[in-house]
């Protein structure tokens, strides 16, 4: 097997959400019967549909595996397209591409017949309304586990009744004030982008950068203090 094939097959195993391969094997696809030109056109169409679906707000907010299907289709179709560029048909990636694309294209199941629901259980809000993410010195890239840390915070929104959020970037006192103002704003914008990918809308967030103002730990000027290099997210309830 060529090194190109090995690389693509390795990518097929790892480019699943969370790095976990799907639990089933896709059935052989009728796309395998197409000529190379028609096959490439069908793969391109499925890939483009998957990219659009993965980026759609309704996909990110859906209470279904649709987001996983979109990313699986994008990954597997991309692998299959790579093989076609070398004049080859890779049956596993083609079949998985077709399988996940078909799931995306299938109509949503009809709603079940209404049944009398039991008395609702009032969920308790157990989450703190304040979250903080800390940054390396002179960096605006959030920590690698930012999404995992923020997901429970966003998911607590319905139970806690939070309606809006402030996202405020901060720096320590090292570096020029003007530079730190910009750095704190970039940090806040990058965290806001993660929150948006987890389901918050831009209209629900107020984003700002305060530079060296609002230190968590007071220090002299020019001190690299990790506690001050942060973005603070505060959830707001109506009337607060």
Image (cartoon, rainbow, N blue to C red):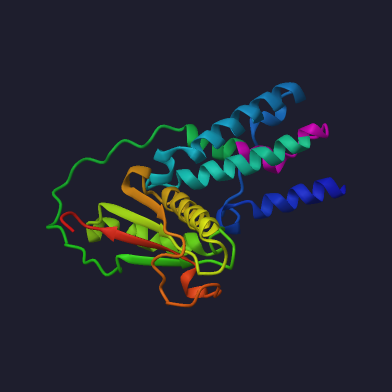
Residue toward you, 210 or 140 = 210
- Residue 15 % position (x, y): 64, 51
Q: Is residue 55 above or below residue 178?
A: above
Q: How many marks?
A: 0
Residue toward you, 151 or 133 = 133
**What predominant SS class does the magenta segment belong to?**
helix
Q: Is residue 90 magenta?
A: yes
Residue occupying image coordinates x 32% and y 54%: 165
Q: Quadrant of the C terminus?
A: bottom left
Q: Is residue 41 magenta?
A: no
- Residue 36 % position (x, y): 76, 25
Residue toward you, 31 or 15 = 15
Residue occupying image coordinates x 53% and y 57%: 183
* Quadrant hosting residue 38: top right
Whether residue 105 sits left or right of residue 88 in the image: it is left
- Residue 190 % position (x, y): 50, 53
Whether residue 48 sits left or right of residue 105 in the image: it is right
Residue occupying image coordinates x 49% and y 62%: 146
Q: Is residue 124 above or below residue 202?
A: below
Residue toward you, 22 or 167 = 167
- Residue 123 % position (x, y): 21, 63
Q: Is residue 7 above or below residue 113?
A: below
Is residue 1 visible in this depiction of the protein?
no
Whether residue 40 sits left or right of residue 233 in the image: it is right
Magenta span:
84-97
Is residue 219 visible in this depiction of the protein?
yes
């Amino acid at each position: 097997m060529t090194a190109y094939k090995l690389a693509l097959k390795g990518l097929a195993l790892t480019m699943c959400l969370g790095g976990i391969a799907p639990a089933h094997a896709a059935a052989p696809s009728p796309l395998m019967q197409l000529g190379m030109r028609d096959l490439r056109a069908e793969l391109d169409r499925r890939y483009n549909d998957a990219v659009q679906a993965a980026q759609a707000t309704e996909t990110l907010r859906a209470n279904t595996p649709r987001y996983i299907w979109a990313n699986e289709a994008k990954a597997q179709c991309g692998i299959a397209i790579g093989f076609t560029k070398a004049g080859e048909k890779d049956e596993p990636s083609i079949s998985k591409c077709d399988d996940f694309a078909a799931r995306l294209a299938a109509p949503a199941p009809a709603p079940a017949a209404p049944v009398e629901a039991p008395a609702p259980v009032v969920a308790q809000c157990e989450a703190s309304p304040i979250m903080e993410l800390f940054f390396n010195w002179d960096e605006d890239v959030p920590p690698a586990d930012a999404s995992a840390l923020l997901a429970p915070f966003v998911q607590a929104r319905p139970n806690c009744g939070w309606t809006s959020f402030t996202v405020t970037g901060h720096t320590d006192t090292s570096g020029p004030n003007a530079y730190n103002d910009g750095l704190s704003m970039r940090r806040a914008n990058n965290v806001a982008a993660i929150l948006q990918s987890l389901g918050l809308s831009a209209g629900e967030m107020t984003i700002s950068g305060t530079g060296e103002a609002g230190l968590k730990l007071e220090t002299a000027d020019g001190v690299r203090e990790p506690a001050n290099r942060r973005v603070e997210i505060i959830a707001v309830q109506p009337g607060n």
